[in-house]
Image (cartoon, rainbow, N blue to C red):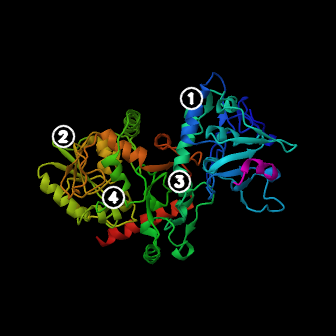
Amino acid sequence: MLANKDKSLELHAPDGRQAGFGSGPRLLRIPPFPGARIREFTALGGGSADVAELVEEIRGLKVGGTYWAAQPEVPSGCVLVRRAAALEAAQQVALGKPVVLWAVDGAPAKRADGVKVISGDCDPWHMLSAAAAVVLEPDDEIRPIAALLDVPAYLHSIDGALTAESHSPEQLLSEELTFASFENPFTGDPMSAREMIELCAFWRQLIDSNRDLAGGIGFAFWKQDHVAPLLWNGSAPFRFFRNAGEIGAGAPVAIWRTKAAPEALAELERGGAPLIEVEDGFLRSRGLGADCIPPLSITVDRLGAYFDPSEASELEQILQRREFDANLIERARDLRRLIVDAGIGKYEQGGLVFERPAGPRRHILVPGQVEDDRAVQAGGCGLVSNLELLKKVREQAPGDYILYKPHPDVLAGHRRGTIAERICLEYADEICGEVPIASLLAMADEVHVNTSLAGFEALLRGKAVTTYGVPFYAGWGLTRDLGPVPSRRTARRTLDELVAATLLIYPRYLDPVTGLPCPAEIVVGRLSTGVESELGLLVGVRRLQGKVMRRLRSLVQ
């Protein structure tokens, strides 16, 4: 293994397993996401691995070293030098090429003419991709990456001599990759070296998608710690701004539109800043955003809000154009089963059996929504009233048993959308306020929605769904659509393709236990076992406030 000069990094687990750079894979690391509670992979050892195949995986996915770090501008065809002491020797290699000192030991005391100096952590794959050659020490961690990228490397010895690299990537990484098994940071279960490489690639893809973000605006303080890791660019801390004047002109900005000041958004648009829509994900938490419970998932869309049918969002483009391979479809099928078996909904969990109140009659569930929510205002295409939705459903199904479930935010007293009970029961046969949505979905024969996510959750459970607005899942051949679905939605999708796009590809998830961005399956596992972040004082205050508001509204109905 390459030498490790900092022996303090050599950690040992109580059961004798080794963790950290001293024993585990020095090249492959967990990025230092803000708030993360796990920093290093742990090697379990045992078995053997195909080093040649793993080397190709690393080469193709570009993981290793500080792959998450900054990507400064580097002149093409340059000679990279890793230590100031090697600058003079490097002139033998440069032969007129630009020289860049990418200093691992700080800037030189005296600057050399014509040498660009870059200090701090950088993405080695980015830096080496521009290099014609690199001069480094024999124990430099980027040495195997140079070999992987076929960049000529020259080893600088203590006496100033240069020796051309003669080792292949397989030789340089053979000891790094001899461990056949590692500890999965999320589950603690064994995972292979290939799975570890793929997990690093998952993190790299997330970070690369955030590199141009200047920061965010409109994000409530209580959700910032959960959102920041999912928007982090790998180097600078993600910044949350109060007004547009703090943001550089023209830089892309993540926005939580409903909480951002309209004048700030207008100023950003005048300055040419691309506005990137961020919203709660579809598997959110075991609690309400209105109660200030942070989300475990978000959606990030550079084209528009996924619920606005007036424009094609990234989610719509995935559904319209993407080809789904067999492995992804299998993951989607397994994830759907996990969600259904655990009784998971966006805000709540419940698997209790709800008896059919009207026996053999067809039972239709109508989920209410927050009437001033953007998803209703945009996706409802003119239908924004819960009462009007109920009237339309009754017109469609005059002899069926209709159950109405108010939206949890409305029921909690925080948002608009309440229907007085006596009026509601003119069109619905029953109001099911406290019954978990999963239990109602399991019992119902059909689900009729405006744009509610409950329609998507019903599809997961194989239920017939009728849409009156235009939710993101309408128009793909899986629902009966009475709303004005855009003609551009021409693809026909299977249920598992819809799940793959909506739950696996499009959202971003944060594991509440490790603080690391994670695959969807981890969040589903946490939700199904009730393992989440502790609820703070603010949540209790908001819930008390909701009770007061519900009481006041009941007095005026």
Mark 4 or mark 2, whichever is nearer to me: 4
Q: Label 4 sits on what residue type? A: Phe
- Picture coordinates of residue 212 (x, y %)? 53, 60
Q: Main secondary structure of the magenta part?
A: helix
Which is more N-terminal, label 3 or label 4? 3
Image coordinates for residue 162, horizontal then vertical, percent: 79, 42
> Mark 1 or 3, which is nearer the eye?
1
Residue sitting at the far right: 159
In the image shown, does 474 or 154 lie closer to the viewer?
154
The CA span between labels 4 and 3 is 21 Å
Secondary structure found at label 3: helix
Asked if the residue under mark 4 is in contact with the one under mark 1, i.e. CB atoms within 8 Å, the reply is no
Span highlighted in magenta in the image:
87-96
Q: Which mark is residue 53?
A: 1
**Residue beneath disc 4:** 307
The residue tagged 3 is 230
Q: Position of residue 262 (x, y in %)?
A: 42, 75
Given the image, on which type of amino acid does mark 2 rest? Gly
Q: Is residue 354 visible?
A: no
Q: Residue at x 40, y 45 (%)?
A: 503
Element at badge 1? helix
Q: Which mark is residue 359?
A: 2
Q: Please tell me how crowded label 3 is: few (under 14), some (14-19), or many (20+) other residues with Cα within 10 Å.
A: many
Q: Tag 4 or tag 1, which sits nearer the N-term?
A: 1
